[in-house]
Amino acid sequence: MNFILDGFFQAIDLLITGNAETYSAILVTVRVSSYSIGSSLILGIPLGFCLGYFDFSGKKPIRTIVDTLMALPTVFIGLLVYAFLTNRGPLGNFSLLFTLPGIAIGQTILALPIVIGLSATAIESMEKKLRITIMSMGANRRQLFLTSLWESRHALLAGAIAAYGRVMTEVGISMMVGGNIKWHTRTITTAIALETNKGQFGMGVALGLVLLTIAFCVNFSVSFLRRRY
Amino acid sequence: MKLDVPIYEIRSLKHSYAGRLVLEIQHLKVQPASIVGLIGPNGSGKSTLLRLLGLIERPTMGQIFFNGRSIGPFSDEARFQVTLLPQEPFLMKRSVFKNVSYGLKLRNNKDDLIGRVNEALSLVGLASEEFVQRPWYALSGGEAQRVALAARLALKPKVLLLDEPTASVDAASAQLIKEASLRARQELGTTLIVASHDWQWLYEVCDDILHLFNGKIFGSRRETMVFGPWQELETGRWGRKLSDSQELLVPSPPDKDAAAVIDVFSIQDAESREAPNDVCLRGIVSRLTLERNSGCIFVTIVAGNVPFVVGLSQQQFQDRPLFPGKTIFIRYSLDRIRWI
């Protein structure tokens, strides 16, 4: 058990002394997860709104597909994105393999069904009386959309956090599409996997603690925003 | 706006939910600055009609015209002029101030926002200094309903649609809501369309009353509607045993659960019939209501457990003074009963 405790102390040391390799992985993780969560929110919230708000033929099968995609295995997404981005693949010309945008594309595919599904649930659970109230005050379609989103903000935020947590903690996409290249595409999770394989528990535990700290900061900020708004 | 153009006109309207027809109106006109009451049992189509007039839903078939122009949800011709207050109070997750000012901001009408919110709150009897910063969850049901009404009154609408505005509030809140609604009509010339079970209030204030049943308007006169189930009585005639053992007779109904529209044409001090198909029932006067516009007095007479409404002119009323608690006889003819 000593090696776990040693790892814990080593972790504190790495973080306090500003170990460059550790901070590189942190920076890469924050950057790439910000890209992917940003794009999945921009795409996913309007799509989730449409799925939750409108009644149309084929809605139920689409909802089932979205719910199924929420459980997509990350290695499978990694495999698909790799196949598309490799030189032989249809998007090979863009040279996105082993780059941060490449990882971000894969993570967006991972987060998008979660954002769509949870946004749709938030909008579906929105009271019908809210729509009547907004429309009866004279709102146009755009105002109805924006006010509905604002009124569902707590549920949407919960969906965004769930998606962010999934993106932050995934390994498969970052490993397969990013290639775990030191100083370049090495994220916290791929670094943990690598360091553990090397027997470097200290580095692994340190990075794990960082992940926990980031998760705590995000949740703290969100609960602050919830109290404020 | 031309005076001869109705503010609303409905033509050949049909509305269905999941294939079930819930409202059917061939033709209806509402005059500007009038007060129209909607009366009918639950499920008769009152709320549906208000939602259609309030641009919340589009009719399945037919058209609604506002000031002569065809409208539907989000119509620019009407969406800033019509507002609906739903039956159950609903406020958005924001402060009272933001709820009341929401519609004004939608209209980009931000001059003296604070003053106008305060004015609207005072119209519904809420002290602005006490309520304006309160969050939505710190209000009672009656206060929430009044804030919701204030949010509509702040818009100074051309049409105010009220769906059971006093159904879920206490007597004091109900009175304030009634007064504020009527002030909108007096001061702004707002057209009011009100669905309510408060017949007495509607009789007092409305220019016109529409009776709805099973999604159809069946008359605007003060007729009595009696619901089934009907049964063949021991005498071989169709009717219903009332709670005081009297027999409410009707002609053979189209089905056992049909509703009969009964037009009471006479009230008298003693039991008598002038024609074989006349039916006479004993009842007790329970309520007297003055119709403001016509000066007509409406007498509610309860026979057994069924309330009948009879309209009397001032002269008729002076000839036969009535008061609540007095026993009286009503007479109607089987030949004049309509089924719906």
Image: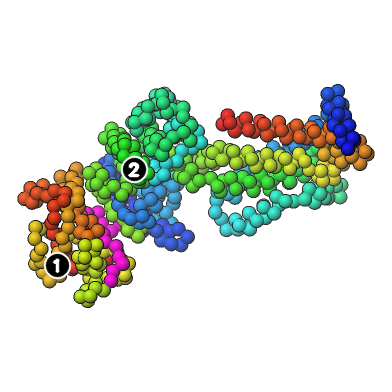
The disc, 2 or 1, on the residue closer to the chain's N-terminal end is 2
Between residue B6 and residue A41, name the one nearer to us.
A41
Q: Chain of mark 1?
A: B
Location of residue A12 in the rendering, given as x and y in whole percent from the top left corner: 83, 27
Is any atom of residue B249 visible in this view?
yes
Location of residue B60 in the rendering, given as x and y in whole percent from the top left corner: 43, 57
Location of residue A138 in the rendering, given as x and y in whole percent from the top left corner: 44, 39
Q: Chain of mark 2?
A: B
Q: Which of the labelled discs sits on residue B166, or is there none?
A: 2
* Residue on which the image places disc 1: B278
User: Are the residues flagged by discs 2 and 1 in contact, CB closer than 8 Å?
Assistant: no
Colouring scheme, one of rainbow, by chain, secondary structure, one colour: rainbow
Q: Residue at x 81, y 36 (%)?
A: A208
Whether residue B222 is in magenta: the answer is yes
Q: Residue at x 50, y 46 (%)?
A: A127
Amino acid at pointer 2: Thr
B9 relative position to B99: left or right: left
Amino acid at pointer 1: Asp
Q: Which of the labelled discs sits on residue A223, or is there none?
A: none
Q: Residue most toward the left?
A: B319
Residues rendered magenta in the picture: B217-231
